[in-house]
Amino acid sequence: MKRLFLLVAILAVAIRPAGAHVGSPDVALEGMAGPYHLLVNVKPPDVIPGTAIVTVYTDRGEGITVSAQPIYFYSGVNGAPSADMLPAVAGSPGQFKGIVWLMSDGSSSILLHVSGPGGKGDLVVPIVAVSTAQKDIPPATGYILAGLGVLLFVLMVTIIEASVSEGITRGGEPVPVYRRRSKMIAIGLAALFSSLIVYGGNTWWRSWADRYRRFMYRPTRASYHLAPDSGGNRLTIRIDTAAQRKTLLSYVVPDHGKMMHLFVMRLPAMDAFAHLHPIRLDTATYQTLLPPLPKGRYIAFADLVYLNGFAETIKDSFSIGEDLRDSLHRMDPDDAYAYALPANLQDNPIRDNNVIVCGKAGTGVRMKDGSMMAIEGAGAGELEAGQLYDLRFAVYDAAKRSARLEPYLGMMAHAAIVKDDGSTYVHIHPVGTYSMAAQEQLMDRMTRASGEYHFPDPASFRDSIDGVMRHLQGLPEGARNEWLMKQMNREGGGPAGMGMAGGGQEAMKMDNMVSFPYTFPQPGNYRIWVQVKRNGQVLTAAFDRVVK
């Protein structure tokens, strides 16, 4: 048990933050492959097997070659296919684009190999490859295939019929009577045999279609129960234990030192917001205390990361019947909430220092400590769906000077991007939308002998993780921040796995600028919640953007 606890403690340090998605399948990553700085965008397929579209941007365009190799968690690098070259994009120096076949679902990665004048480097891009769609054959294609099937059926019967009658009769001679009988028998047997082939093929096809439907990704559900008590506004989350991934619930690992990240927003205005960190009571039950949120219907996004790097967001909703009162109790010191009013609203109906007015292009958001956050760069201009953007934000103090930021949960900043109808959500960090836990686990698989991966004993693993969390929660804030910084592997270099070839890693700069690589999946109205930390306070800003 002590050995397992030590192993889990080491693992907890190695676990990296995971990006979870709802309606936002693209993976964006910024990192180092040896000496090469890369910005990567991956569009995973919605059907497995399928092809992922991989686009790589480099800071060095000449003499660079990039290849991509799919790596599957359960088989490791020894069971992976060979790498394929990503062609350079004509007229775009430093840009490479190609496809990668993904043949297996689950936690996967694409291993990028970069070679050039500066040497070689590798970068692991984790993705969650799951089938989320079922493709229908176009009617015209179906009619063509049906016609070809009938033609083949007739040709087979005709060929067999001729082979036992006219085909073995001399030219000009009549077909003997006994061969006529054989002809009829052959026609019947050929028709029966061909029908059996068609029936067997149809049965085989239907069985595979049923299997595909059975293993298609189905979102996990949860129930929410709100009960006011002496300790605050207690929210209990119970995950459906009949879920498709129920066996993974025992293998939840810490993400930024938290077992769960819960984002809640009031519908339909998305005006009340909270970022909370529920504690785990048992395998499927989590609990937190809600801040003083106003009554209404809320949408909730609960982020979980599993041991195999599979990142999942549990999307559900719950209602608050009456305005919640403020409480001095918080279940987690890193919890934060805010109210965001539309930029064109002059009157402030909520008297609270957590009220902010949404920013838009050319304006900033005044946060609760008097500092200002502004959106800059490409993110402040017109936005188009399907384009990769570097969303940049700057923080200034009350005197309009650059404000130095502090790490928040081991990162420069966190952001939640949500479409106004709740169909798109992503919890994003400056390094991208991907799961670094999957990256770390796959890198570990690359260094181990080939063979199928086996999970540890679920009860022992869960107990060991709970022990790590109790230890972490008992640390003073300074020591806890130091632990998280080591967890992010930021001291003296970039995050682990960002430069597998060694060197060329970039340190996290604690200044007033934060940026997030992201691709908006579809047109619509989006709200971007950005959270930073300054002078020990978690500060929240909100920006409304229209994507065409």
Image (spheres, rainbow, N blue to C red):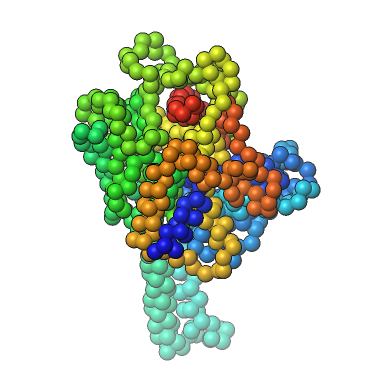
34 versus 175 height, above or below: above
139 versus 28 height, above or below: below
Left-right relation of 423 to 78: left
Front in this rendered view, residue 518 or 534:
534
Left-right relation of 231 to 18: left
Residue at the image point whose x is 62% and y is 56% from the top = 69
Instruction: List x then y, in percent, for residue 385.
Output: 53, 33
Left-right relation of 258 to 282: right
* Residue sitting farthest toward the top: 346
Front in this rendered view, residue 16 or 86:
16
Image quadrant in which you'd find residue 36: top right
Residue at the image point whose x is 73% and y is 39% from the top = 93
Image quadrant in which you'd find residue 393: top right
Instruction: List x then y, in percent, for residue 379.
Output: 56, 26
Instruction: List x then y, in percent, for residue 105.
Output: 47, 57
How many labels were placed on the picture?
Answer: 0
Left-right relation of 277 to 51: left
Residue at the image point whose x is 41% and y is 62% from the top = 2
Q: Is residue 457 visible?
A: yes
Front in this rendered view, residue 98 or 1:
1
Residue at the image point whose x is 48% and y is 73% from the top = 156
Front in this rendered view, residue 120 or 525:
120
Q: Is residue 361 visible?
A: no
The quarter of the image holding the N terminus is bottom left
Instruction: List x then y, in percent, for residue 341.
Output: 39, 19
